[in-house]
Image (cartoon, rainbow, N blue to C red):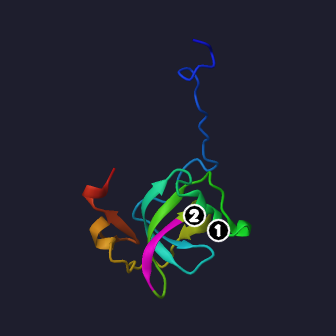
């Protein structure tokens, strides 16, 4: 085999610019620019959505891919939904009040000191 054969080649892995996630499942967060808040239920260490989704974000506010991205049970004044948000666009929610989302009770055991307790069945 030659040094360039497919069995000996290794693909490079790009490490995220931000070394670790700032938030954890159960944390309540707020978006920096848009009027919504939510509870974290999953984290991707780097962007893991479609290119189409990413390209739909206006370039002037498009976040870097090489950072944690959070899956949120989100709410705004009108509705509840699932959101996918970069770490740079989230801040801790100072309110600490409950999130009004129909899936909160299926993933969490209640609110304690401003954060949700992850149900044992949903822990990694």
Task: Confirm whether residue 105 shows in the render.
Answer: yes
Please rate how many residues cluster around mark 1, counting C-alpha atoms within 10 Å: few if below 14, some from 14 to 19, many from 20: few
Assign the magenta stretch its main secondary structure. strand
> Where residue 94 sits in the image (x, y, percent)?
51, 76
Residue under label 2, please give it: 53
Please, is residue 18 above or below residue 75 in the view? Answer: above
Q: Which residues are magenta?
A: 79-84
Q: Quadrant of residue 62?
A: bottom right
> Where residue 11 sits in the image (x, y, percent)?
59, 32
Residue 115 or residue 107, whichever sits in front: 107
Locate residue 99 relative to residue 16 in the image: left or right: left
Task: Confirm whether residue 22 shows in the render.
Answer: no
Give the residue at x 28% y 72%: 105
Is residue 49 inside the magenta stretch? no
Mark 1–mark 2 distance (CA, rounded to whole Å): 7 Å
Residue 123 or residue 6, whichever sits in front: 6
From this viewpoint, which residue is outermost toward the top?
1
Q: Looking at the image, do the residues carrying marks 1 and 2 touch, with CB atoms under 8 Å apart? A: yes
Please rate how many residues cluster around mark 2, counting C-alpha atoms within 10 Å: few if below 14, some from 14 to 19, many from 20: few
Give the residue at x 56% y 23%: 6
Is residue 82 inside the magenta stretch? yes
Residue under label 1, please give it: 57
SS at badge 2:
helix
Q: Quadrant of residue 1?
A: top right
Q: Which mark is residue 9?
A: none
Q: Quadrant of residue 65?
A: bottom right
> Where residue 50 sits in the image (x, y, percent)?
55, 58
């Amino acid at each position: 085999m030659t040094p360039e054969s497919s069995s000996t080649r290794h693909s490079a892995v790009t490490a995220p610019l931000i070394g670790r996630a700032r938030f954890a499942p159960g944390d309540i967060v707020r978006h920096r620019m848009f009027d919504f808040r939510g509870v974290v239920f999953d984290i991707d260490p780097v962007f893991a959505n479609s290119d189409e989704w990413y390209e739909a974000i206006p370039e002037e506010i498009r976040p870097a891919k090489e950072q944690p991205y959070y899956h949120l049970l989100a709410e705004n004044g009108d509705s509840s939904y699932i959101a996918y948000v970069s770490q740079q666009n989230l801040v801790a929610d100072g309110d600490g009040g409950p999130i009004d989302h129909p899936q909160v009770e299926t993933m969490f055991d209640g609110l304690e000191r401003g954060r949700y307790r992850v149900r044992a069945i949903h822990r990694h």
